[in-house]
């Protein structure tokens, strides 16, 4: 059996299955930006449905859109403009859920961007404000996995 060329391999879509059962296909270059998915691909060496049990379809669609558009932007000025437009579309709850999904999926560029936005929003605010915005207690109950090993060096 002949080996597949890199062109044949790169044309195959990567299938991702969200926590709410939605199947989303993404291009391999987008999938490789998602470190969690990259590890699935590296381990299996196959292009199969990859389960993402802690990410819902709304967040994954937003993440895929972000990765596509952010990756296509070439200059820092254009990236800043894109980030500003992207931010306008997010509500506070969306941002928090997107942050949790980006953290689980290990998407460094999106995670860094969201952390900076959260820091900017929280500057000169009380601890109570930050806890209210982040709904810390509920997140520990619902998303305990996201806080695992967070305080380790």
Image: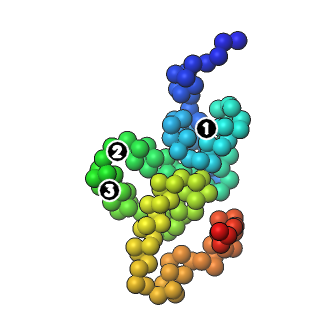
Report the coloring of the rendering.
Answer: rainbow
Label 3 secondary element: helix
Residue picked out by circle 3: 80
| Mark seen at residue 15 | 1
Crowdedness near tag 3: few (<14), some (14–19) or many (≥20) residues, C-alpha within 10 Å: few
Image location (x, y in percent) of residue 25: 56, 38
Q: Are marks 1 and 3 in contact (CB under 8 Å)?
A: no
Determine whether 81 is above or below 145 in the image: above
Q: Residue at x 49, y 46 (%)?
A: 64
Q: Nearer the viewer, residue 120 or 86?
A: 120
Marks 2 and 3, how far apart at CA: 10 Å
Determine whether 94 is above or below 125 in the image: above
Lower sequence index among marks 2 and 3: 2
Q: Residue at x 59, y 53 (%)?
A: 105
Q: Are marks 2 and 3 in contact (CB under 8 Å)?
A: no
Quarter of the image with the N terminus in it: top right
Determine whether 131 is above or below 108 in the image: below
Determine whether 129 is above or below 152 in the image: below
């Amino acid at each position: 059996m002949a080996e597949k060329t890199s062109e044949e391999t790169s044309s195959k879509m990567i299938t991702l299955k969200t926590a709410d059962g939605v199947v989303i296909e993404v291009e391999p270059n987008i999938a490789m930006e998602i470190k969690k998915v990259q590890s699935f691909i590296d381990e299996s060496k196959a292009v199969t449905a990859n389960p993402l049990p802690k990410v819902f379809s709304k967040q994954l669609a937003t993440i895929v859109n972000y990765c596509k558009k952010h990756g296509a932007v070439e200059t820092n000025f254009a990236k800043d403009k894109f980030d500003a437009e992207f931010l306008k579309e997010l509500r506070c709850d969306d941002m928090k859920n997107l942050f949790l999904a980006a953290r689980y999926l290990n998407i460094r560029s999106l995670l860094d961007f969201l952390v900076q936005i959260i820091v900017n929003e929280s500057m000169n605010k009380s601890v109570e404000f930050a806890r209210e915005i982040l709904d810390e207690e509920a997140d520990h109950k619902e998303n305990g996995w996201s806080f695992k090993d967070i305080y380790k060096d």
